[in-house]
Structures are given as structure tokens and as C-alpha cells.
Amino acid sequence: MQQIIKGNQVVPDTWEMLAKDANLEQLTNSGDIIVPLAMWLEHAHALKARDGRLGVWLDADEEAESIADDLEHFAVIALNFPVFSDGRSYSNARLLRDRYQYQGELRSIGDVLRDQLFFMHRCGFDAYALREDHDPHAALASLNDFSEVYQAATDQPLPLFRRR
């Protein structure tokens, strides 16, 4: 079972993440699943009728606005980083937390590396599924890489000069 970083600790990932090409017929009626955005948009009614908890994942080229009216249905929203250098999911994280006030788990998935965790946290992520070749226990310390921040962000809405 894969492990993720959540709540400042390494925990087992109990969610099943469906592939982008998954179809509704493959699902059971129970269990916690994270479905791709296309499946949610096409089969929302059937997915809401399931017994297990529901999450959705967005690829970097998909916009948070497309699920803004449905946030109460998701226990987790996962945002994909297809490559380390693609930062579009940072913007979606900020939108979900700051504009749409999403309070559930916001998880980073894909090409997620230790060096990104501190900045992901600043944008509102609170769970991290690291790339398989990275040790989540070693990466956990990176959430505390910096003791003070200058800029305002989701985790600290006031810039340093306003906090003095």
C-alpha cells in the first residue's frame, strides 16, 4: 500500500485512485475512490449514489472552476503535477482554498518531489503523494525547511511586514 504525507506524518493511502481512462462499470458500490474529472462530469449522479467516500482529481490542464459548485461532494481533491516543472496545479490549489473556500483534503499527486512540499503547503495542499522513487519519511522534514516567510499565501494571509 502506498504511503502519503498527511497531517505532518506518513500514513497509508486508503483511497483508490482511478486512471484517466477508467469507466463506471469497473466500480464497486463501496470503498473510497478518487475519480478523474471527466468521469465526475459525465457520471456525477451515479457517483454520488455510491456508499463510499468520493474524491476527484484534476490534471494540470483542467480548471478548478469546473468543480466549484460541487465541492461539498468531495472528501479529497487531488491535483496532478504531470512533471516537476509544471506549476499549474499550484494555481488550482490557491483557487480551491482561497476563492472557493474548500476545506477538505487537498492532495498533490504525480511528479511530486521533496523540494516542492513547502511551497505546496503554502498554496493550500495538506496531503502529498510523492513520486514512487522518493521516501515520504525523508521528505517529511521539508515541510519545515523555512522558519519564516515574507510573502502572503494561503497558509499565512499576512505578509511579514504586516505581522510585525
Image (cartoon, helix red, strand yellow):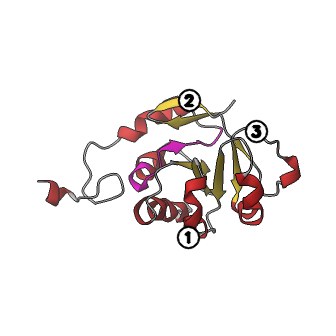
Q: Position of residue 92 (x, y in %)?
A: 51, 63
Comparing 44 with 145, the one in front is 44
Mark 1: few/some/many CA within 10 Å (<14, 14-19, 20+)? few
User: Tag 3's secondary structure?
Assistant: loop
- Residue annotated with mark 2: 11
Residue at x 22% of width, y 59% of height: 159
Q: What segment is highlighted magenta in the picture?
A: 121-132
Q: Residue 127 bears which disc, if any?
A: none
Circle 1: residue type? Glu
Q: Quick one: label 2, few (<14), some, or many (20+) residues within 10 Å?
A: some
**Residue 101 lies in quadrant:** bottom left
Q: Which residue is mark 1?
A: 65
Q: Residue furthest right?
A: 25
Q: Secondary structure at mark 1?
A: helix
Q: Amino acid at mark 3?
A: Ser
User: Could you tell me residue 5's position as x and y percent?
Assistant: 52, 36
Residue reaching furthest to the front: 49
Instruction: Say if residue 56 shows up in the picture.
Output: yes
Counting every numbered tag in the picture gives 3
Q: Residue at x 74, y 50 (%)?
A: 49
- Closer to viewer: mark 3 or mark 2: 3
Kindly identify the amino acid type of the residue bearing the numbered disc 2. Answer: Val
Residue at which label 3 appears = 30
